[in-house]
């Protein structure tokens, strides 16, 4: 196990009816800006629940944060925060709303252009406190300090990380996920699976607790994911998916072990250039990364194969093949297709992705061996 | 899954050489009291490492905190804190030193007799901040807000819980555990196992993440525990045991599920009356609790049997028997005996334990069905 230092102070308020408790978590005199997305919260009753819980409080609203939240949209919210002297942000929605809210929280506390947080590693000096009502299990943003933001003007999708934007609390009510369309459930399960893969499918360092926790989350996804599509209002199933997705990226399973993140970096470029859903890009890229990088990742791929998918027959090469095939079949069973051509993309989509990564000097993977050439090889295998 | 609210802000600093970092975690102008036990830290180099890390700081010392830390001893440290105007406590040792330190931290902030924290549920209004250098993986106290204290005068062993005594940071250096005697390793592994059991071997609530995390910790103990006795200076093995024992009782695996704690409550009385090690009492009591309460706990006992010990043959009754037998054999393999008679105790030791629990009106277990009569039945099966 590698050395590490870490803490995660986010307060989780889990379970049905929990939205009613948010006012207790927010200072009584706070001027609160509620941020949300395209309005699904107005259809599924979450908006009303939040309004009721916040009755008598100073509550402002900013809707319209899009999937892959736009930098430009967030900057409008920053103006509103300044004008209304907002001192608490309440993010109501999925990971995109929350990631946008994290940027809103930090942007006014950075010198110069806030885009510098995303591309130059500028750190904010402070941030507005954030509370969360989560309605989509996927990104894990509700219990971490990261955010992914897209600049619409240049189609750049980048991320930042700051302890200052770690939520003060996150409300996880599984009932809020009942009305999610199957496409979002599928994407969310794939995203969660790949979060774990990025922290687990690297090389062994003998960290048995972390390995087994990672396998625990993957096993829960494999058991509960398809069930969530079949019986959308099964509280137990939705509870387990929601809790699994928080644990997939709250930081703890990555502590003491190597991390990859190549699949996410490649996937971000595909979303930025061609507009695919985040989960879709991951379902395409991960099998390719595992297949091309099997020389480095083989031992862990086989461990996952055995413990998560029950692959226990055959020689090493065969077990690796079987494990990757099972993983890909699982993504397909969640309704998320795994080939570029499934989304109308052909081989000519690859070079722009490779060029963008090459231009940034990006060399990816836990061993820094996934060069732009390797990215080309990975994507050619995924047409 | 049941509803819950929880956070755990403890910063973990994990790995070899980490003691050197403690000064960064303690305010530069703090008047620090270092607390420790019987002096083993002076033999294994930990004392010197702490002194070196704290060079130039105002550092006071209070040694002699005993296993099953005495209330009376802690009160002497409270006097020292007042006299020297201590404003930070640094606990260097195992769970007993730390539990004692938690009481020291809180005692001067409670009205009247501080024993009230233990027996009347009095809450302190404040507590001195605590930092931890852990040298014995067992109690999980390094990442939780609980403590167990014994009043020597009356042989009462009781616990308290306060968010105010949650450590600010805990340093976990597996190398500090190399010199532990086998008896302490055995007791520590049993203690860790039983912590998980108290939060897992109850009744199913469909909480699959928590169940699998619990099984992860148990599996790591079963794999690494015996190895720790064979090759004491194996860094990987000691790392996994140390990390497993922290996770067994940092609160997360119990969130959303029922909890038992009958084994601990019965064990505490046996330690208080007859002086057995904490781990020894747990190894005696748990197989009895599982056996007598199998009607309520059967489903989870079988789940553990299958996933942790590979018990997959036979009917329900047989699987439960096999699972309990495997668990008991595991304790024995750790050098911890599992019968009262192994420690020179006969059937006449039972009534005083039953009486103490009855006098306190204690009715134990996740369903509050472990009455004093059941305790008698459990212990009679353990002679």
Image (spheres, coloured by chain):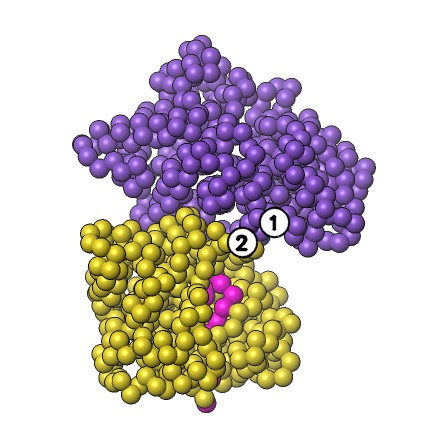
Chain colours: A yellow, B purple
Residue found at x 55% / y 38% = B177
Among all residues in the image, which is located at the extreme right? B83
Q: Is residue B292 magenta?
A: no
Lateral position of residue B170 relative to residue B300, left or right: right
* Label 1–label 2 contact, CB within 8 A: yes
Where does the image place residue B339, in percent across and percent down from the top left? Answer: 40, 19
Find residue A249 and report its image quarter.
Answer: bottom left
Q: Is residue B285 visible?
A: no
Badge 1: chain ID: B
In this view, B85 is above or below B13:
above
Q: Callout 2 environment at 10 Å: few (<14), some (14 to 19), or many (20+)?
A: some
Q: Is residue B325 visible?
A: yes
Lateral position of residue A21 relative to residue B157, left or right: left
Residue found at x 49% / y 32% = B185
Lateral position of residue A259 relative to residue A218, left or right: right
Q: Is residue A142 magenta?
A: yes
Residue closer to the observer: B280 or A366: A366
Residue found at x 63% / y 36% = B44
Q: Are marks 1 and 2 on the same chain?
A: no
Residue closer to the observer: B24 or B119: B24
Residue closer to the observer: B55 or B371: B55
In this view, A109 is above or below B224:
below
Where does the image place residue B34, in percent across and percent down from the top left? Answer: 71, 40
Residue identified by numbered label 1: B17
Q: Which residues are magenta?
A: A141-153
Mark 1 secondary-structure assignment: loop
Mark 2 secondary-structure assignment: loop
Label placed on residue A3: 2
Badge 2: chain ID: A
């Amino acid at each position: 196990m590698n050395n590490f230092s870490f803490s995660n102070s986010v307060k989780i308020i889990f379970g049905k009816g929990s939205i009613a408790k948010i006012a207790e978590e927010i200072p009584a005199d706070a001027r609160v800006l509620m941020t949300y997305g395209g309005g699904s919260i107005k259809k599924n009753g979450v908006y009303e629940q939040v309004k009721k819980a916040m009755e008598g409080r100073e509550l402002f609203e900013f809707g319209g944060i899009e999937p892959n939240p736009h930098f430009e949209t967030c900057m409008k919210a920053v103006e509103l925060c300044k004008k209304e002297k907002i001192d608490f942000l309440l993010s109501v929605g999925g990971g995109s709303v929350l990631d946008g809210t994290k940027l809103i929280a930090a942007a006014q506390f950075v010198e110069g252009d806030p885009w510098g947080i995303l591309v130059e590693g500028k750190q904010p000096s402070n941030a507005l406190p954030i509370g969360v009502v989560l309605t989509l299990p996927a990104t894990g943003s509700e219990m971490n300090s990261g955010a992914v933001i897209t600049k619409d003007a240049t189609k750049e999708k980048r991320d930042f990380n700051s302890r200052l934007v770690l939520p003060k609390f996150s409300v996880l009510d599984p009932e809020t996920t009942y009305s999610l369309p199957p496409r979002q459930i599928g994407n969310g399960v794939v995203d969660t699976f790949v979060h774990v893969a990025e922290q687990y499918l690297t090389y062994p360092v003998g960290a048995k607790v972390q390995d087994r926790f990672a396998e625990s989350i993957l096993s829960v996804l494999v058991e509960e994911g398809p069930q969530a599509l079949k019986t959308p209002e099964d509280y137990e199933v939705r509870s387990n998916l929601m809790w699994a997705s928080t644990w997939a990226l709250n930081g703890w399973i990555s502590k003491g072990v190597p991390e990859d993140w190549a699949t996410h970096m490649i996937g971000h470029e595909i979303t930025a250039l061609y507009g695919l859903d985040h989960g879709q890009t991951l379902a395409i890229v991960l099998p390719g990364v595992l297949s091309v990088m099997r020389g480095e990742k083989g031992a862990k791929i086989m461990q996952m194969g055995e413990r998560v998918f029950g692959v226990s027959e055959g020689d090493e090469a065969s077990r690796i093949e079987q494990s990757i095939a099972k993983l890909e079949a699982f993504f397909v069973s969640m309704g998320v297709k795994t080939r570029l051509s499934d989304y109308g993309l052909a081989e000519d989509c690859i070079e722009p992705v490779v060029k963008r990564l090459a231009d940034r000097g990006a060399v990816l993977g836990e061993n820094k061996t996934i060069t732009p050439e390797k990215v080309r090889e990975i994507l050619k295998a995924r047409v």
